[in-house]
Amino acid sequence: MLPDEGLLNYIVDRSHGCRHVTLIDPGKQSAEEATKRSIAAISAGSRMIFIGGSTDTPDEVVHETCKMIQEALELQIFASSQDPASDEDIWRVPVVLFPGGAHALSPAADGITFMMLMNSQIRRFLIEEQLKGAPYLHKFGVEAIPTGYLVFSPGGKVGEVGEADLIEPTQTELVNSYALTAKMYGFQILYLEAGSGASTQVDSKCIEAAREVDEICLFVGGGIRSSEQAAKAANAGANWIVTGTLTEDAANLQELSERISKVVAGAQSSSS
Ligand code: 1GP
């Protein structure tokens, strides 16, 4: 659900400290379950929903998931508007496509992180998937947020599929050059990714090296599960922390809420 200030303004706004994104892989649960998880995540303090992940999910499944989450958010806004004690704005949370390529797009999304996998070694993820996806996004009026995407060691599946020249923790100068390059391309977001389910999160020194480029909005994800890990990334300069596995392997909605509350608290504990 699009916030009043518009998607880009909402994303780059730093007045709320470091915020949390819940990544939902529409291929890993039904649209109903994805919707329940999204609502629980937002109640626990998550401020954006990303839809993406698996490479083989059909467009219909992605669309159904986006649509159902949007409808549930509308209902929550309506319910809150009937209750003077509740704040309907907490439900104005954008549902944004976080694609693995030109497939799995949906006009029901509020926008898309339109990404260049900057350290991919193959043309496909530097420009070809984008060429395929752009006419579709144009046709359906899905807002594209220019995003640089960098995959760090260990990198996981995205590192493999994207044939990324994985960045190691010592390569801080390189990270800074990528951040400058991203800025010069006009990218609004730089996403630092360790890979879904990564055993180690993106190194703080690398986040700091990217943070030196003040204008760019930094997303950090991959392997973050605890409040401490979230605080570490936030203190190094992340503007948004993304978690996916945390939600996927929660035994139930209660556990999901507790886990997200902790990560949100960690992210928000940062003074930066
Ligand atoms: C993956 O960065 C995200 O693209 C989230 O990673 O699944 O490890 O939370 P996790």
Image (cartoon, rainbow, N blue to C red):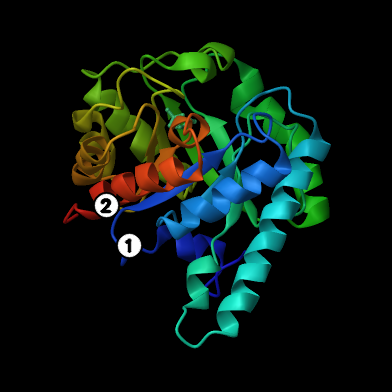
Task: Point out the quarter of the image occupied by ligand 1.
Answer: top left
Residue 79 lies, with reference to residue 132, above or below; the image says below
In the rendered image, which quarter is residue 62 located in? top right
Is 225 displayed left or right of 205 in the figure? right
| Vertical relation: 223 (above or below) 136 | above
- Residue at (41% x, 45% y) in the render: 183
In percent of the image, x 52 and y 76: which residue is there? Answer: 88
Q: Residues within 10 Å of mark 2 (few under 14, many from 20)?
A: many
Element type at marker 1? Answer: loop
Residue identifier under label 1: 14
Seen as rendered, the residue at the extreme left is: 271
- The kind of residue on which mark 2 rests is Ala
Does the image show residue 205? yes
Per the image, label 2 sits on a secondary structure element best described as: helix
* Picture quadrant of residue 124: top right
Q: Position of residue 9 (x, y in %)?
A: 48, 65
Identify the residue at image location x=40%, y=57%: 45
Q: Position of residue 153 (x, y in %)?
A: 36, 16
Label 2 vs 1, first from the N-terminus: 1
Q: Nearer the viewer, residue 22 or 182?
A: 22
Res 189 visible:
no
Locate residue 168 relative to residue 192 in the image: left or right: left
In the picture, the quarter occupied by the N terminus is bottom right
Query: At 24% from the left edge and 47% from the top edge, which residue is drawn?
Result: 266
Residue under pointer 2: 265
Q: Position of residue 186 (x, y in %)?
A: 48, 48
User: Which one is nearer the viewer's eye here, 154 or 260?
Assistant: 260
